[in-house]
Structures are given as C-alpha cells and as structure tokens.
C-alpha cells in the first residue's frame, strides 16, 4: 500500500504539466460558472471543417437542451492555419458560451481531451460530449445521441456506432475492435471512434489518472478511455449516429504512428486488467441506442501498391526480428506472402490473430524500447490491410462487415486460448 502511494507521488512529481488548462481558461471557467453540459472539440489545423462542426453543436444544444446551461470548448493543439480564429468568430445566436484555448502538455489528441475533461470537472458538468473536428456528417442529432444516454438513462460512457466505409478505420477493423472484444468480452464496435459521451463521474476518474506523459496523450486516448470504461465498473452503451463522413487517413502515410500508439496502449493496459481478461470467455453486445439503418458511405480510396510495398520492405528490414517474435508456422506464412504478386497477397485471418497475440505476449516481456517493437509490427499491419482490400474488393461495406470483420473478431475470441497458452496463464484446454 505504502509503495503504491509513493509510486503515485513520484509520478505526480515527474509530470511536466499538472494541468492542461491555461490560467486564463481557469479564470474563464470561474466567470461562466457551473453548467449542465460541456461539449469539447479537439482541434489541429481544422479550418476547413470546424465551423460546420461548431454550428451543428450549437444547433443541437439549443434544439434539444434549451433549458440546460451548456458550454462549448475548443481545445487546440497550436494550429498553424485559421482554426482558432474561425473558432472565435463562430458565435452562438442563442448565447451559448464558448472557450477557445491552446492546451498545455504533450502534443496530441489525448492532451486536448485532458483539457476538456478538466474543464468539465471544474464546471461541474453533468454530461460531456466530444466530437472530432474533421466531421462532415455531424448533425444536431449527434449531440442528442451522445448526451441523452448520460442525462436521462444514467450511462457513464457512450461510444459511437456508425457506418463507415470498409476501407475507413483500418486500425479499428484490423485490431482495436477484435482485441478489445476478445480480451474484455464487450462488443464495442468503435472503441477508437473519436466521438463520445461521458458522465461527470467518468471525467473525474480520467483526470485523476497519471498517463498524460505517455502515448495516451497522443492517439492512445480513445482506446484508453474505452478500456477504462469497460473495466472500471462504468455503465457503457453505444449510440447510433449514422454514416461517418470525415477526412479519412491513408494507412500508408499517416496511420503508422497512430497504429503504434493505439496498439501500444492496448498492449500496455493488458497487465493492468489481467485479473479481468484472464477470466473472460466469449463476448456480449453492449446496449445500442437508436435505430441503425443500412447505408453505403462514400468511397474511401487506399493505395494497394503502397500497402504491399510497405509489407514487403518491412519483411526485408525486420524479417529476422519477426522470426524471433512470432511462432515458426506464422513466420513461414508471412515469408510466403512476400513472394506473392501484389494483387494476390493473402494473409489468413488466423495468421493475423496469432501475430497480434504473439506481439502482445512479447510486449509484456519486452524490457527495451517497446515503441521499437511496435514499429517492427507495423509492416505486418500493412500486409493485413492489403489482404483485406483484396479479399473485400467486390463486397459492399455491409458484406465486408459480416463476412470478414465479424468473422475475424470471432476468431480472436476463439484463439484467445493461444495467447493464454503463450503467457502460461492457463492450461491450453482452459478455454476449450
């Protein structure tokens, strides 16, 4: 007990920033006074879409919560375009207060959200929602969808449920959804979706955690929040939002660092909740509020050639290291993939599942630079996405969801015994 207290105290001392809020923001919060609802928008170079997002949030707050006091907070990462100027100029015709700030701390979405969480606690908000700043499909109804479950039904964490193009959200589809479901037994479809609702109780929990000098402060934040909500006794649901249309990220150019931060957070939280996930078998859905409809979202383009090249170059650089991490039969499959013509490359789902579990196991034992281990894994992720693109080329988004993504999630659950066997947690027959 004493050592735990000392460790927490040491972490506090080592934190470079004890708050993400600047002094003028803290003063502004005092001037505004207590509120019922806080809506936050993390931003960085978002001038093309931010005004649209803010206007829809204003309209949603006025339309659905006219008798509650609301505040909007734009938490910016030091944008170099006109993001903050546009945020300042976009005023509510209904008098809803707005705060625009540059957060303090490590650059990244996590620190941006930390500022929003801290503001929500200081304002005494009963409910908080956050929205990505690049949304093109947001409507006033999204505001209601994320806040009503907290305000009227007692939920602590509202995760988004959207329809996304089959080539959007490749990190979610390839690993975040399946691994979260297999480990913790909850089918949260968009664990890194970007748009969430929170209770004040959950905001208070988040702000007391000592993670703000880690990758959680960057792109690890969404999976961190989801994992905490599932495992710390908070009431979790999903809210249907419709199709998500935003500025998609190219897996070959922008998602490498994000993959490493998300997966590093996923793997890094496994020891924290080992006592829970060891005993989880199978999975169950969480309540979904709203009525999903079948829609086909806009096309998302990916470069298959680049994905294949990144995988094969990764094998050239890291193949000898892959051999040390994965089991021999898995390495043999990966090596064979490098010989395939680009448009015939195929990674069996079981190979991907075992690869993820092998890296998760090694991550738990790795005493050197864990980020380097994730860098070694990234080209295999590119190979998995290339294989997915080829396999689903003639499928609709709904067909890809049912025939590939859901089947993969089921296999992650079935093969969890493989991970436990590697970790020596249970006998191989424990989950049979």
Image (cartoon, grey):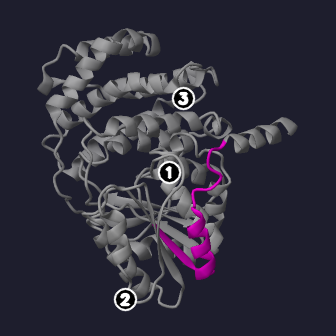
Closest to the camera, between mark 3 and mark 1, is: 1
- Residue under label 2, please give it: 93
Badge 1 local density, few (<14 within 10 Å), some, or many (20+)?
many
Q: Tag 2 or tag 3, which sits nearer the N-term?
A: 2
Asked if residue 345 lies in the magenta stretch, the reply is: no
Residue 372 appears in which quarter of the rendering? top left
Per the model, the C-alpha gap separating discs 3 and 1 is: 39 Å
* Residue 187 seen: no
- Label 1 residue SS: helix
Along the viewing direction, whichever of 193 and 368 lies nearer the viewer: 368
Closest to the camera, between mark 3 and mark 2, is: 2
Residue that extends furthest to the right in the rendered view of this protein:
2
Position of the C terminus, as image quadrant, is top right
Along the viewing direction, whichever of 131 and 339 lies nearer the viewer: 131
- Residue under label 1, please give it: 110
Per the model, the C-alpha gap separating discs 3 and 2 is: 61 Å
Asked whether, in this view, residue 210 is left or right of residue 310, the answer is right
Determine the residue positioned at 27% across, 27% down: 383
- Label 3 residue SS: loop
Q: Percent from the top left, x then y, of residue 133?
A: 35, 62
- Which residues fall within the magenta stretch? 15-40
Per the model, the C-alpha gap separating discs 1 and 2 is: 30 Å
Along the viewing direction, whichever of 293 and 303 lies nearer the viewer: 303
Q: Percent from the top left, x then y, of residue 376?
A: 39, 21
Task: Name above or below for residue 32 compared with residue 5.
Answer: below
Q: Quick check: marks 3 and 2 in contact, CB under 8 Å? A: no
Badge 2 local density, few (<14 within 10 Å), some, or many (20+)?
few
Q: Percent from the top left, x then y, of residue 415?
A: 47, 29
Badge 3 local density, few (<14 within 10 Å), some, or many (20+)?
few
Q: Quick check: marks 1 and 2 in contact, CB under 8 Å? A: no
Q: Percent from the top left, x then y, of residue 425?
A: 64, 24
- Residue under label 3, please give it: 432
């Amino acid at each position: 007990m004493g050592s735990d207290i000392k460790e927490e105290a040491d972490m506090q001392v080592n934190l470079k920033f004890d708050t993400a809020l600047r002094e003028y923001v803290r003063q502004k919060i005092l001037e505004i006074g207590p509120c019922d609802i806080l809506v936050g928008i993390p931003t960085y170079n978002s001038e093309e879409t931010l005004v649209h997002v803010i206007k829809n949030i204003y309209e949603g707050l006025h339309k659905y919560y006219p008798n509650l006091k609301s505040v909007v907070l734009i938490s910016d990462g030091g944008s170099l375009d006109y993001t903050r100027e546009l945020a300042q100029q976009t005023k509510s015709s209904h008098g809803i207060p707005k705060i625009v700030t540059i957060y303090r701390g490590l650059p990244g979405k996590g620190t941006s959200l930390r500022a929003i969480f801290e503001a929500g606690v200081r304002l005494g908000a009963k409910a908080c929602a956050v929205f990505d700043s690049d949304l093109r499909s947001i409507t006033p109804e999204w505001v209601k969808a994320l806040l009503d479950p907290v305000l009227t039904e007692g939920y602590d964490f509202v995760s988004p449920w959207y329809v996304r193009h089959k080539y959007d959200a490749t990190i979610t589809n390839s690993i975040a959804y399946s691994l979260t479901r297999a480990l913790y037994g909850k089918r949260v479809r968009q664990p890194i979706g970007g748009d969430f609702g929170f209770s004040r109780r959950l905001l208070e929990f988040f702000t007391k955690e000592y993670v703000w000098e880690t990758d959680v402060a960057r792109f690890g934040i969404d999976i961190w929040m989801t994992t905490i909500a599932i495992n710390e006794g908070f009431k979790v649901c999903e809210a249907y939002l419709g199709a998500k249309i935003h500025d998609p990220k190219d897996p070959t150019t922008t998602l490498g660092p994000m993959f490493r931060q998300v997966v590093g957070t996923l793997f890094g939280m496994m020891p924290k909740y080992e006592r829970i996930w060891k005993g989880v078998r199978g999975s169950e859905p969480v309540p979904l509020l709203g009525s999903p409809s079948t829609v086909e979202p806009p096309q998302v383009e990916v470069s298959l050639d680049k994905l294949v090249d990144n995988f094969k170059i990764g094998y050239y650089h890291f193949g000898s290291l892959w051999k040390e991490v994965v089991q021999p039969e898995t390495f043999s499959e990966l090596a064979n993939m490098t010989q395939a013509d680009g448009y015939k490359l195929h990674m069996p789902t079981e190979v991907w599942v075992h690869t993820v579990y092998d890296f998760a196991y090694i991550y738990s034992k790795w005493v050197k630079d864990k980020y380097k281990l994730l860098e070694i894994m990234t080209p295999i992720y590119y190979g998995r996405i290339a294989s997915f693109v080829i396999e689903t080329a003639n499928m609709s988004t709904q067909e890809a969801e049912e025939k590939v993504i859901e089947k993969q999630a089921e296999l992650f659950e079935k093969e969890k015994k493989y991970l436990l066997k590697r970790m020596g947690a249970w006998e191989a027959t424990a989950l049979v």
